[in-house]
Image (cartoon, grey):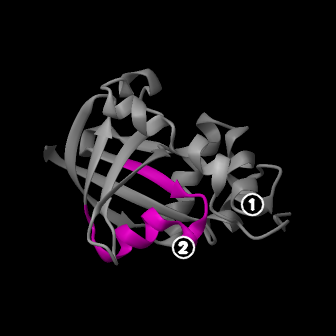
Amino acid sequence: MLRKIGEPAPPKGLKLKLFRAPIYLYRFKLGFLLGERFIHLKHWGTKSGNLKETVIEVIDQDKNNRKVYSASGFGERSQWFKNISANKSVFVTLKNTEYRATARILSADEATKVLLRYVKAHPNSIKGVARLSGYEMDGSEQEVIEFSRIIKIVEFTLDGRA
C-alpha cells in the first residue's frame, strides 16, 4: 500500500547545486551524454518573467507524435511546475537539439497510463520517484495507480526546432 513518509521538499543549498549540475552539460553542448532519459527545460518565471532552466527526467516518450513526458517529483511545489502551469510555451532540449514545445498537465487517468509504462521500463526507479515525492511504495500496479492520482505528469509536445 502506498504510504506517506513525509512532505516533498525542493532541494536547497548543496543538494540544489547537485540537482542543477546537469544544466552545465546542456550549456556546453554535452546533453547527449545524458541520452534521452533527461531534458533541459527552459521556461519563464511567473513573477520575474525571466527565462529559467532546469533538467528533468523523461519518464516516457511518444516519438511518433513528438511527445515527451516528465513527472514533477515535488508535485505542485516545484518551481518549474508552477511556471509551466502559468505559461505553457517552453523550450526543451533533448540530447543536443532544442525544440519549441507546449506543456500540458495530464489528467490522473492519463498519468496512470504513463506511469504504468514507466514502471515496466524502469521497475526500480518508480520507488525513487515516490520517495522524492514523500511516499513509499513497492511498485505494484495498484500503488502506481494510487500514486498517479497524486503526482503531476507533464506532456511536452515538441513543436519544432528552436
Q: Nearer the viewer, residue 162 or 53?
A: 53
Q: Tag 2: Cα neighbours inside 10 Å, few (<14), some, or many (≥20)?
A: some
In the visual, does 56 lie left or right of 102? right
User: Residue at (48%, 35%) from the top-left corner?
Assistant: 22
Location of residue 61 in the rendering, given as x and y in whole percent from the top left corner: 40, 42
Q: Secondary structure at mark 2?
A: helix
In the visual, does 67 lie left or right of 18? left
Name, please, the residue furthest toward the front.
13
Residue 81's place in the image compared with 101, above or below, is below
User: Residue at (43%, 72%) from the top-left corner?
Assistant: 82
Question: Magenta stretch containing residue 69, yes or no?
Answer: yes
Residue on which the image places disc 2: 76
* Location of the C terminus (image quadrant): top left
Location of residue 101 in the rendering, given as x and y in whole percent from the top left corner: 23, 54
**What amino acid is at disc 2?**
Glu
Location of residue 133 in the rendering, given as x and y in whole percent from the top left corner: 69, 61
The disc label shown at residue 85, or none = none
The answer to whether the residues at label 2 and label 1 have Cβ atoms under 8 Å apart is: no
Q: Nearer the viewer, residue 14 or 155?
A: 14
Residue on which the image places disc 1: 142
**Magenta highlight range:** 68-89
- The answer to which quarter of the image holds residue 66 is top left
Q: Secondary structure at mark 1?
A: helix
Q: CA distance from mark 2 to mark 1?
A: 23 Å
Residue 145's place in the image compared with 19, above or below, is below
